[in-house]
Image (cartoon, rainbow, N blue to C red):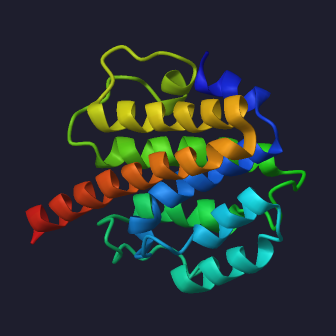
């Protein structure tokens, strides 16, 4: 099943986890630490209010500050894409716009990975990848696509019990992206 189909079939918790996981993997681009989004993951698990955790994360990451290109991502576009994910996060995981947010986070995260991947991706856009076109995919984009699919499948198959494993998948992706950003910074320095 394609990523687009999985997003279309996901319930609210799956959509919230999917969007949050994409954002979580991109936190290194905003200069955030590994724990900045943990309160949101906890809110998804226990059903508590996530607006306080979201507000705290926005404050910690300087949401709304605009991308200045000085962040660790090394580029205006990647930072701007990550910042938009955070800025657009709904105040509740069951908000009416959660599907649009999850979909936008999916696209933004794949674009970020595509921009940071040193290998060229011959697909005309990330939409091709999201719809199932995986031929000759660049490694970083392929890994991000797999992570997005895995998170949605975990939530669809295990509900709230899949959140812990979804967080583990996201943590792995964040480490990979942090390493890519660090290599790029060393290459420029």
35 or 97, nearer to the observer = 35
Question: What x and y, as percent, mark residue 24?
Answer: 52, 59
Question: What x and y, as percent, mark residue 43?
Answer: 74, 65
Relative placement, left or right, of 110 versus 38 is left
* 97 shown above or below 118: below
Instruction: Inspect this view and state whether residue 35 appears.
Output: yes
Relative placement, left or right, of 39 versus 174 is right
78 or 25, nearer to the observer = 25
Residue visible at 43% across and 59% down in the picture: 77
* 31 shown above or below 148: below
Residue visible at 63% across and 48% down in the picture: 163
* 102 shown above or below 56: above
Q: How many marks?
A: 0
Looking at this view, name the residue that lies furthest to the right: 96
Question: What x and y, as percent, mark residue 10?
Answer: 76, 33
Looking at the rendered image, the quarter that the C terminus falls into is: bottom left
* 128 shown above or below 149: above
Looking at this view, name the residue that lies furthest to the front: 161
Relative placement, left or right, of 24 versus 181 is right
Relative placement, left or right, of 109 versus 69 is right
Looking at the rendered image, the quarter that the N terminus falls into is: top right
Residue visible at 57% across and 69% down in the picture: 37
Residue visible at 45% across and 31% down in the picture: 146
């Amino acid at each position: 099943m394609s990523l687009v189909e999985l997003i279309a079939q996901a319930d609210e918790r799956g959509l919230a986890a999917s969007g949050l996981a994409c954002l979580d993997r991109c936190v290194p681009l905003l200069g955030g630490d590994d724990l900045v989004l943990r309160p949101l993951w906890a809110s998804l698990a226990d059903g508590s209010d996530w607006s306080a955790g979201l507000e705290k994360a926005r404050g910690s990451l300087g949401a709304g500050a605009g991308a200045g290109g000085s962040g660790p991502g090394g580029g205006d576009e990647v930072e701007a894409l990550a910042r938009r994910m955070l800025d657009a996060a709904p105040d509740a995981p069951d908000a009416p716009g959660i599907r649009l947010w999850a979909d936008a986070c999916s696209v933004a995260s794949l674009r970020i990975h595509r921009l940071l991947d040193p290998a060229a991706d011959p697909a005309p856009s990330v939409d091709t990848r999201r719809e199932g076109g995986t031929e000759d995919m660049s490694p970083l984009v392929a890994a991000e696509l797999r992570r997005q699919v895995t998170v949605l499948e975990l939530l669809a198959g295990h509900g709230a019990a899949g959140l812990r494993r979804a967080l583990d998948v996201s943590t792995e992706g964040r480490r990979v992206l942090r390493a890519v950003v660090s290599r790029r910074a060393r290459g420029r320095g």
